Image (cartoon, rainbow, N blue to C red):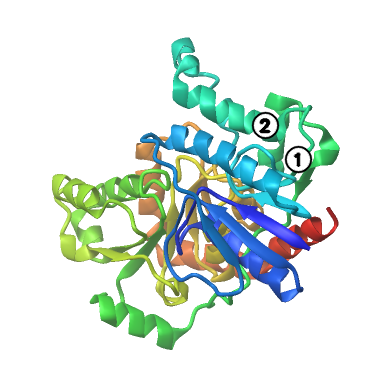
Amino acid sequence: MKIAFCLFKYFPFGGLQRDMLATAKICHESGHEIHIYCMKWRGKKPDWMSINEINISDVSNHSRAKAFSKKVGKLLDKASFDCVIGFNRMENLNIYFASDECFAAQKKNRPWWRQFTSRVRTYKKLERAVFSPRSKTSILCLTEQQKNAYQDYYHTQDERLIVLPPNLPFQKTHEKDDHISKQLRTSLGIKADDFMLLSIASNFNTKGVDRSILAFGSLEASQQQHCHLVIIGPGNIDDMKKLCKKQKINTAHIHFVGSQHDINPYLAAAHIFLHPARHEAGGIVLLEAIKAHIPIITTLVCGYSSIVKTAQAGKVLPLDFSQAQYNKSLRKFLNHTVLEQYAQNAGQYADRLIPGQAITQTVRAIEEY
């Protein structure tokens, strides 16, 4: 098969990008011809795929998305692809991998005048091109919750919506390993009897890193003294450092380690995984934390929070987020007996999470198109 993969941007540490690359790699290994269409590709370019970077000069994100959709549509018309799969919402897709929440549903309760801004109209049009009953695009959803949200708004036909199994990556995640844990903690200057809190975020605001810093800052001085917050990701560190300063947090206890090719040592060393996201269609990191037997504090907005609940692997905060409630939950978690019970629950559930199932099913959908 000759397959086109479409996404706005590729960078090495994004979840959407990781899913795209894993899917393309398996398709290539199955003998298919792979062509990528994107506005920008950052990082290593595999030699087994054709990467087409489309030059878009528009200033705003939504106008670039609109222009990219139109331009790629014309290019796809000229080429003969057996299947076109998109990882962002756009026109002319045979299959859409739904890595985002329903945009229109998110905006429906905003002031009426905001429904008519260029940004909202553009994104709703691109979303409608995928989910409208008039569309023929097949849609791969991460969770039942996500499927229902799209279907409630667009009345998309049930047969076009497929819910994938939990999207745990292929790579092995570490369970607790004393040697790996000790090495990582020593490298960060974290004492053996201190609590290590972990946050992984490709976007600090979306994933609620500021909420975690505020919760850390709410701890008593004696608790802060024995806690370290480790933040993985390429977000705006300067803004977060200003927030730490405002909260009068000892910066030696907040570790911004940037993007990491291998998060497994951090998962092995962590006592608590913090993911108070504002938006999250799935939340692969929640599955990785469960697989690593780490107690979790997250929000109900995350698609995979239902798995955290089922596994009884931590605390799921309600949709109506309360910083005070989050602060209180963190304080309660700083107890070895509490953490041990949640870690045991996660460990008992972990074997149900089979790596690569979602990507394997995505490849099957492409090949059966």
Query: What mark, if any, has residue 129 been given in the picture?
Result: 2
Amino acid type, mark 2: Ala
Query: Which quadrant of the view contains residue 214?
Result: top left
For label 2, the SS is: helix
Name the one closer to the observer, 248 or 154.
154
For label 1, the SS is: loop
Question: Which residue occupies 81% across, 60% down?
Answer: 367
Furthest-bottom residue in this view: 179
Task: Give coordinates of residue 178: x percent, y percent.
Answer: 43, 85
Would you place residue 174 above or below residue 299 in this image? below
- Whichever of labels 1 and 2 marks the residue nearer the N terminus, that label is 2
- Left or right placement of residue 283 versus residue 255 in this view: right
Gap between marks 1 and 2 measured at Cα: 8 Å
Would you place residue 347 above or below residue 243 in this image? below
Name the one closer to the observer, 302 or 325.
302
Task: Give coordinates of residue 105: x percent, y percent.
Answer: 59, 27
Query: What mark, if any, has residue 311 been given in the picture?
Result: none
Does residue 48 appear anywhere in the picture?
yes
Task: Give coordinates of residue 69: x percent, y percent.
Answer: 57, 39
Task: Give coordinates of residue 173: x percent, y percent.
Answer: 55, 74
Amino acid type, mark 1: Thr
Name the one closer to the observer, 38 or 148.
38
Q: Mark 2, residues whose alpha carbon is within 10 Å: few (<14), some, or many (≥20)?
A: some
Does residue 191 appear anywhere in the picture?
no
Q: Mark 1 points at which residue?
A: 137
Say whether marks 1 and 2 touch (CB < 8 Å).
yes
Q: Mark 1, residues whose alpha carbon is within 10 Å: few (<14), some, or many (≥20)?
A: many
